Image (spheres, rainbow, N blue to C red):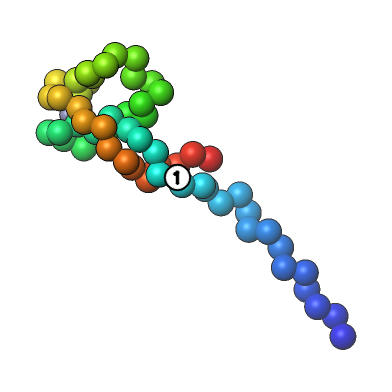
Amino acid sequence: MAYNNSRKPVSQHVYEDTMVWQCSECQCWSRMEFILVGEPECPLCHAKMVQELKNVRVD
Ligand SMILES: [Zn+2]
């Protein structure tokens, strides 16, 4: 009797809770590692951005 070996899923994306800068006015956000200033403003609407935990794709 033969059994099929279960295969690994083909390159699934990995998601992880990550701290990001989230715009307080629109949906724009950016990873903190890309922001070098202490209090960034949104590149789209120039509103203040706040630190937030977001589930983002890491792979
Ligand atoms: Zn914005």
Quadrant of the rendered image holding ligand 1:
top left
Left-right relation of 14 to 2: left
Q: Can you say whether 8 is above or below 21 in the image?
A: below
Q: Is residue 45 visible?
A: no
Label 1 beta carbon less than 8 Å to ligand 1: no
> Residue placed at 22% from the left, 18% from the top?
39
The x and y percentages for residue 44 are: 19, 24
The x and y percentages for residue 49 are: 20, 27
> Residue placed at 85% from the left, 80% from the top?
2
Q: Quadrant of residue 23?
A: top left
Left-right relation of 56 to 5: left
> Residue placed at 26% from the left, 16% from the top?
38
> Residue placed at 15% from the left, 24% from the top?
48
In the image, 59 versus 35, the foreground residue is 35
Q: Quadrant of residue 35?
A: top left
Q: How many marks?
A: 1
The x and y percentages for residue 3 are: 81, 78
Q: Residues within 10 Å of mark 1 (few under 14, many from 20)?
A: few
Q: Can you say whether 42 is above or below 1 in the image?
A: above
The residue identified by callout 1 is 16
In the image, 38 versus 27, the foreground residue is 38
Q: Residue furthest top?
A: 37
The x and y percentages for residue 28 are: 24, 32
Q: Quadrant of residue 4?
A: bottom right
Q: Can you say whether 15 is above or below 33 in the image?
A: below
Q: Can you say whether 38 is above or below 13 in the image?
A: above
Q: Quadrant of the N terminus?
A: bottom right
Q: Is residue 7 visible?
A: yes
Q: Secondary structure at mark 1?
A: strand
Q: Amino acid at mark 1?
A: Glu
Q: Residue furthest right?
A: 1
